[in-house]
Amino acid sequence: EAGVTQSPTHLIKTRGQQATLRCSPISGHTSVYWYQQALGLGLQFLLWYDEGEERNRGNFPPRFSGRQFPNYSSELNVNALELEDSALYLCASRNRGGGNNQPQHFGDGTRLSIL
Amino acid sequence: DAKTTQPTSMDCAEGRAANLPCNHSTISGNEYVYWYRQIHSQGPQYIIHGLKNNETNEMASLIITEDRKSSTLILPHATLRDTAVYYCIVHNAGNNRKLIWGLGTSLAVNP
């Protein structure tokens, strides 16, 4: 069974540009979570999607946005990039149908670097 | 979601048990305790979770206190490959609450 896949692995942008990060969940998983992990820090919750709907979002400005597609894959968009957006962006998926206690399973992330 | 508190770092000798504590004193009645670990720059790996009973799987054991305000992850025979940052979080996907991850415990397994 394929795990959570994220693309691209690395992304280099300059200030003011826009970035799009993609996530394909494990087959059968309908929930997707996005996290930001700055160097040396813990995971900061960004967004949570269930069945195409946004369930909750973390304390991030509106230039961080996303969506979930009918096939449950997801995109994270970051507009007007700033230097402090440089981080590892992690996506996780969860089998919502398995119950509220099902754990999240993570991809290996997209390393976004802002020059 | 409730916040968790973990020691910043711990050491363990190879082959010995590693006991990693976590405090979650504000956990609500329907929130589960989850443990993940993250090896340098990889995505976190799920280890184990529980509600109120102790749990064991092929990776670890989870001991949850009766009042559910704290838990301990036990790696029974730590190896060098268990060196990682270990995160404890509490969550119930039925609650539309933000997920809060702390900084975790950096476990160093020494030869």
Image (spheres, coloured by chain):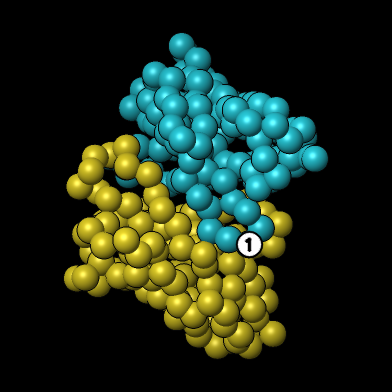
Q: Is residue A41 visible?
A: yes
Colour in which the image shows chain A: yellow
Looking at the image, the residue that sits furthest to the top is B66
The residue at 66%/58% (across/down) is B40
Quadrant for the C terminus of chain B in the image: top right
Query: Can you tell which quarter of the image residue B11 is in?
Result: top right
Query: Can you tell which quarter of the image residue A32 is in?
Result: bottom left
| Residue tagged 1 | B41
Quadrant for the N terminus of chain B in the image: top left
Judge the density around disc 1: few (<14), some (14-19), many (≥20) Cα neighbours within 10 Å.
few
Q: Secondary structure at mark 1?
A: loop
The residue at 75%/42% (across/down) is B108
Report in which chain the residue with disc 1 lies.
Answer: B
The residue at 69%/85% (across/down) is A115
Q: Nearer the viewer, residue A71 or A43?
A: A71
| Residue B27 image point, x, y percent | 45, 26
| Residue A113 image point, x, y percent | 64, 78
Q: Nearer the viewer, residue B87 or B45?
A: B45
Which amino acid, mark 1? Ser
Q: How many marks?
A: 1
Q: Nearer the viewer, residue A50 or B83?
A: B83
Residue B107 lies, with reference to residue B66, above or below; the image says below
Q: Is residue A27 left or right of residue B15?
A: left
Q: Is residue B9 left or right of residue B100?
A: right
Residue B85 lies, with reference to residue A23, above or below; the image says above
Residue A97 lies, with reference to residue A89, above or below; the image says above
Looking at the image, the residue that sits furthest to the right is B111
Query: Can you tell which quarter of the image residue A103 is in?
Result: top left
Q: Which lettered chain is shown in cyan? A: B
Q: Is residue A100 left or right of residue B51?
A: left
| Residue A56 image point, x, y percent | 36, 53
